[in-house]
Structure formats: structure tokens, C-alpha cells
Image (cartoon, helix red, strand yellow):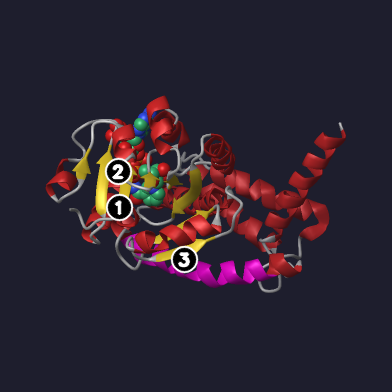
């Protein structure tokens, strides 16, 4: 008889780079790991290492109490989970959806799951697939605390830091979107910077050590800015937003001189100039966040009043 229990068994649906990393790490930790992927063949290496391969999502679901889904987006997750056979098999089990998407999709999935007798936990992975199983992995969760606690020991085998953000199901996706906003805006900036540097005869390798230095400036600025947002002070002492727009204008000028599209920086400069126009020129750059948030509130209130 197998020594495995439902508590030490996990099913992984979706075997892209992240799904494979998750399944492989569960396997390494000794959990009975059942896998399925829409396109056959992606489970080969995992099966060779001891995973149970299946021919349908429904077959994979019945093998475990905990079902981890990790596919490209919620359209894909829905295509799997809302197939009638899979939905029927999921009844009474727990879905942990580690697929990235927007908060409203997580909320919609929680409603759907409740209607079908499925326990639902949402999650987000904030680090690359190579970090899974290492101390560098970062996982965020939201949904029923009791469900998270029940599966915590299985999830801990994935290594790294695990944070339950609260019962509101959309919270993990909301953190994910906000954090990826930082990441992709920074990556857009870096890609653009490499093009501008190249136009000026500077290679990517030459720029890289200095680019790293710019990255290192950011963490204390993030901390200070969070404090300023929290208390509502936006001191521009040392670096007022009027100085920031001057620097941004130099980037736009140099880019466009070389025929390089400066749309992203133009948009950022425009936001900062609007903040100055509202009388906040002596404030620091992070006043932009406050103004954007207040404008959104005012817009929503206006719509509600219409
Ligand atoms: P992808 O985002 O490329 O997703 C690939 C997986 O989605 C495959 O299993 C693929 O199946 C499946 N899929 C796509 N469309 C469908 C569909 N219509 N029906 C069923 N399955 C479908 O790969 P990753 O594994 O990298 O990412 C998975 C999730 O993890 C994403 O939400 C991503 O944002 C997130 N993530 C990934 C990180 C990474 O480093 N890779 C880092 C942090 C988060 P098939 O093989 O059949 O095409």
C-alpha cells in the first residue's frame, strides 16, 4: 500500500516553465505529484523522475486534494477548470491558482468555485521559474486563511518566502499587478536606455555596471516614498519634481535626436508636468502617485454621480 496520503499529494495542471518547476520541486520534496498539460509530452521528464502522468485534467484532479494550476492566464485556467469533467472532479477539493492575471478574474473564479463546491485559493509567484525550490522564491496568496494553513506544509516545500495577504481573494493578483507595474516599467526603461546608449556609441556591456548602480539606488527610495505616501508629505527637498522634469526632458531630447521613440518618457514627463501645474512643483516626484490616485477617485466619484 502507498505511504502517500492526500495531504502529501499534489496535482499540477499546466507544464510550462513555471508548472514544470513547481511539479519538479514537489517531486524532489517527496510529494506524490500528478501532472497534466494540454499539449502532451511536456510531462516526459517529470514522469521519468517519478511524477504520475495523466491524459486528462479530470484524471489528474482526482489524484490529489490540492490542485495547483499554473498556465498562461485565466482564459487558459478557465478552459481547463471549467471543462465539465474537470469541474465535476474538482468538487470537494482545493484549487490553488498560481496563474497570473487581474484581480477581478480571481474574484470571478472564487464565485464560480463556490457555486461548484470547490475551495479556492489564489496566488502569485513573484520570482522566475529558476528560483522555485530555492530561498529566493517569493509566493503571495489570498483567500481563506484556513485553506492556506491546511496546505502550508506542502507549499513550504517550494522554498522561499510565502505570504498570505488576507482573505480577500483578489489581493494576491492586486499585489502581482502593482509589483509587475514596477518591473515592466523598469524593463521598458532599461530597453530604451540601451537603445539611447547604443546611439551614443556606448555598448550594453559598458552601461551594465552603471545600470546596476541605478537599480541599487531604488530600494531606499521605495521605502522613503512609501512613508511619504502613508503620512501625506511629499517633500521635494534635495530633488524637487521641477528638477526631475528637466532631467526627463533631456532623455526625450536625446532619444528623439537619434530617431528613437520617446513615448514612454514623454508620458512620464507629461504626468510630472501636470503635477507641477497643479501647484506641487516644490514636492518630490512621488507626488505623482498621490495625484494619479486622487484623480482616479475623483473620476470614479464623477461617474457614480452621473
Ligand atoms: P506560460 O505563461 O507560457 O504558460 C504556458 C502554459 O499555459 C502551458 O502549460 C500551456 O499549455 C498553457 N496554456 C496556454 N494556453 C492554454 C489553453 N488555452 N488551455 C490550456 N492550457 C493553456 O508559461 P509559464 O509556465 O512560464 O507561466 C505560467 C504562469 O506563471 C503565468 O501566469 C506566468 O505569468 C506565471 N509566472 C511565470 C514566471 C516564469 O519565470 N516563467 C515567473 C512568475 C510568474 P501548452 O503547453 O499546451 O501550450
Left or right: residue 23 versus residue 160 is left
Depth check, mark 1 against mark 3: the one in front is 1
Residue 123 location (% of width, % of height): 47, 51
- Confirm if mark 1 falls within 8 A of ligand 1: no
Which residue is located at x 26 percent, y 49 percent?
Answer: 33
- Residue 153: which numbered mark, if any? none
Give how far apart the Cα atoms at labels 2 and 1 are. Answer: 8 Å
Left or right: residue 302 versus residue 23 is right
Q: Residue furthest top?
A: 84
Residue in front for this viewpoint, 217 or 122: 122
Mark 1 vs 3: CB contact within 8 A: no
Residue 44 location (% of width, % of height): 15, 41
What is the secondary structure assignment of the residue under circle 1?
strand
- Residue 214: which numbered mark, if any? 3
Q: Main secondary structure of the magenta part?
A: helix
**Disc 1 target residue:** 9
Amino acid at each position: 500500500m502507498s505511504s502517500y496520503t492526500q495531504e502529501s499529494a499534489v496535482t499540477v495542471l499546466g507544464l510550462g516553465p513555471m508548472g514544470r518547476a513547481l511539479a519538479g520541486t514537489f517531486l524532489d520534496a517527496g510529494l506524490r505529484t500528478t501532472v497534466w498539460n494540454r499539449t502532451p509530452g511536456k510531462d516526459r521528464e517529470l514522469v521519468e523522475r517519478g511524477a504520475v502522468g495523466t491524459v486528462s485534467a479530470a484524471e489528474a484532479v482526482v489524484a490529489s486534494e490540492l490542485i495547483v494550476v499554473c498556465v498562461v492566464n485565466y482564459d487558459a485556467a478557465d478552459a481547463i477548470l471549467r471543462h465539465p469533467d474537470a469541474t465535476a472532479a474538482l468538487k470537494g477539493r482545493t484549487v490553488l491558482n498560481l496563474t497570473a492575471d487581474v484581480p477581478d478574474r480571481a474574484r470571478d473564479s472564487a464565485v464560480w468555485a463556490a457555486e461548484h463546491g470547490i475551495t479556492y485559493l489564489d496566488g502569485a509567484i513573484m520570482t522566475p521559474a529558476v528560483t522555485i525550490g530555492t530561498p529566493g522564491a517569493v509566493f503571495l496568496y489570498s483567500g481563506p486563511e484556513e485553506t492556506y494553513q491546511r496546505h502550508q506544509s506542502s507549499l513550504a516545500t517550494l522554498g522561499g518566502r510565502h505570504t498570505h495577504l488576507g482573505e480577500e481573494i483578489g489581493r494576491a493578483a492586486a499585489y502581482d499587478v502593482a509589483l509587475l507595474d514596477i518591473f515592466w516599467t523598469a524593463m521598458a526603461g532599461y530597453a530604451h536606455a540601451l537603445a539611447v546608449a547604443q546611439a551614443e556609441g556606448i555598448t550594453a556591456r559598458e552601461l551594465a555596471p552603471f545600470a546596476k548602480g541605478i537599480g541599487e539606488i531604488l530600494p531606499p527610495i521605495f521605502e522613503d516614498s512609501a512613508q511619504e505616501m502613508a503620512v501625506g508629505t511629499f517633500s521635494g527637498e534635495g530633488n524637487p519634481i521641477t528638477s526631475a522634469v528637466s532631467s526627463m526632458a533631456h532623455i526625450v531630447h536625446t532619444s528623439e535626436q537619434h530617431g528613437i521613440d520617446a513615448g514612454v518618457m514623454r508620458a512620464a514627463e507629461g504626468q510630472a508636468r501636470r503635477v507641477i501645474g497643479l501647484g506641487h512643483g516644490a514636492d518630490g516626484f512621488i507626488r505623482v502617485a498621490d495625484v494619479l490616485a486622487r484623480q482616479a477617485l475623483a473620476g470614479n466619484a464623477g461617474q457614480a454621480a452621473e
